[in-house]
Image: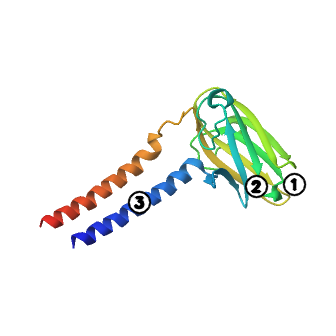
Amino acid sequence: MTRGWITTGAKWLVGMLLGMACWMQAYAHGGLSMAEDMCKLTIGPYTMHFTGYQPESTQEQEFCEDIPNTGRTIVALDYIDEALRPLTTEVRIIRDTGAAPGEEGNLDEITIMHIPPKVYSNGSVTFEHIFPEEGDFVGLVTVKDNQTEHVSRFPFAVGTGGKFKMNMYFWPLLIIIAGAGYFFLSAKKKKNT
């Protein structure tokens, strides 16, 4: 009987860990994901390769999630799908107001960097921005053709320096630990009776 509880507890724990990993990936990066050692930005049916650099602070080290430091940042978006080349691409960075996606209000009021829609027939969008202070931001990349608009929205933080983000990990981790403790203590109690 005890072995059944342990097996159930282990299955529950593994399921919770996998669920937490998926949740954290979605929560942290929105349209960004790591695949085959490259950061991919998903915009509707299309994908781009996303690469960021901070030459003054991290030399040649690339990033595709949170920006480690404030200061000069260079970002390159390279089209993976050739179908993107004739379409217009717009890039915008806004302050994260905590509003739900699409409900930010007047984007111009919270925009800190904007590249208007343009066709990049060479398949690459490169831009530079200086982040003067730490904070939470949202990147918006919009691709349009004549009939359809696709928007990728990805939240990111500036100035994390690779620090642990307690607010994102604390509660899910606490729930997993509490659940695992419950199952293991229940199994131990049943074994002793």
- Spatial CA span between label 2 and label 3: 33 Å
Q: Amino acid at mark 1?
A: Pro
- Spatial CA span between label 1 and label 2: 13 Å
Q: Residues within 10 Å of mark 2 (few under 14, many from 20)?
A: some
Q: Residues within 10 Å of mark 1 (few under 14, many from 20)?
A: some
Residue positioned 69% across, 43% down in the render? 51
Relative placement, left or right, of 13 versus 35 is left
Sequence-wise, which precedes: disc 1 or disc 3?
Answer: 3
**Quarter placement of the N terminus:** bottom left
Residue with the mark numbered 1: 86
Residue 17 is tagged as none
Residue with the mark numbered 2: 80
* Element carrying mark 2: loop
Please state the horizontal and vertical placement of residue 149, each as a whole percent of the image: 77, 56
Sequence-wise, which precedes: disc 1 or disc 2?
Answer: 2
Sequence-wise, which precedes: disc 2 or disc 3?
Answer: 3
* Element carrying mark 1: loop
Callout count: 3
Relative placement, left or right, of 172 versus 31 is left
Residue with the mark numbered 3: 16
**Quarter placement of the C terminus:** bottom left
Which label sits in the foreground, 1 or 2? Answer: 2
Q: Amino acid at mark 2?
A: Ile
Please state the horizontal and vertical placement of residue 169, each as a whole percent of the image: 44, 46
Seen from the viewer's position, the closer of residues 79 and 106 is: 79
Q: Residues within 10 Å of mark 3 (few under 14, many from 20)?
A: some
Residue positioned 41% across, 51% down in the render? 172
